[in-house]
Amino acid sequence: MSTLTQDKVATVVQEFLNKNQPSSYRLDVDRAGIRQNNDWWYVTVVPDQPGVRAYDYAYLLTEAEEKLRDETHMNILLVPTLVDD
């Protein structure tokens, strides 16, 4: 999919995350952290509040990657990022 852009990838991932948010915090795409390497997109995801540890939501990102690949056929890796306390 060579027609993909950083904005398109960010939008697709954020829309997916919006439908699958945890109950006590929110996950958002960090658009500044999106990188492409060949046909893979690395998308950083950040919680909306400090104190949420990466392992608290890493499993959600793993599930999201699988579903996104199945639904969109895009090669996306979601990278957990932390909020500074």
Image (cartoon, grey):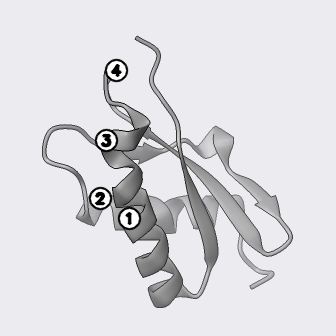
Asked if 5 appears above or below 28 in the picture, the reply is below
Residue lying at the far left of the rendered structure: 23
Q: Which residue is mark 3?
A: 56
61 sits to left or right of 1: left
State how far apart marks 1 and 2 are (Cα): 5 Å
In the image, residue 64 lies at what x, y percent? 40, 68
Amino acid at circle 3: Asp
Q: Which label lies toward us, 4 or 2?
A: 4
Which comes sooner in the sequence, label 2 or label 3? 2
Observer-nearest of 81 and 54: 54
Q: Which mark is residue 2?
A: none
Query: Where is residue 52 shown, x and y percent of the image?
Result: 32, 29
Rounded to the nearest angstrom, the CA distance separating label 2 from label 3 is 17 Å
Q: SS class of the residue under badge 2? A: helix
Q: Say which residue label 4 marks.
A: 50
Identified at 71% across, 74% down, the residue is 4
| Earlier-in-chain disc, 4 versus 2 | 2
- Identity of the residue drawn at 69% across and 64% down: 41
Question: How far, Cα to Cα, is label 4 from label 2?
Answer: 19 Å
Question: SS at mark 1?
Answer: helix
On residue 18, the disc is 2
Q: Quadrant of the C terminus?
A: top left
The image quadrant that residue 73 belongs to is: bottom right
Q: Say which residue appears at 66% left-offset and 39% top-offset.
A: 32
Q: Residue 50: image x %, image y %?
A: 34, 20
Residue where numbered disc 1 is placed:
15
Query: Do callouts 1 and 2 mark residues in contact (Cβ within 8 Å)?
Result: yes
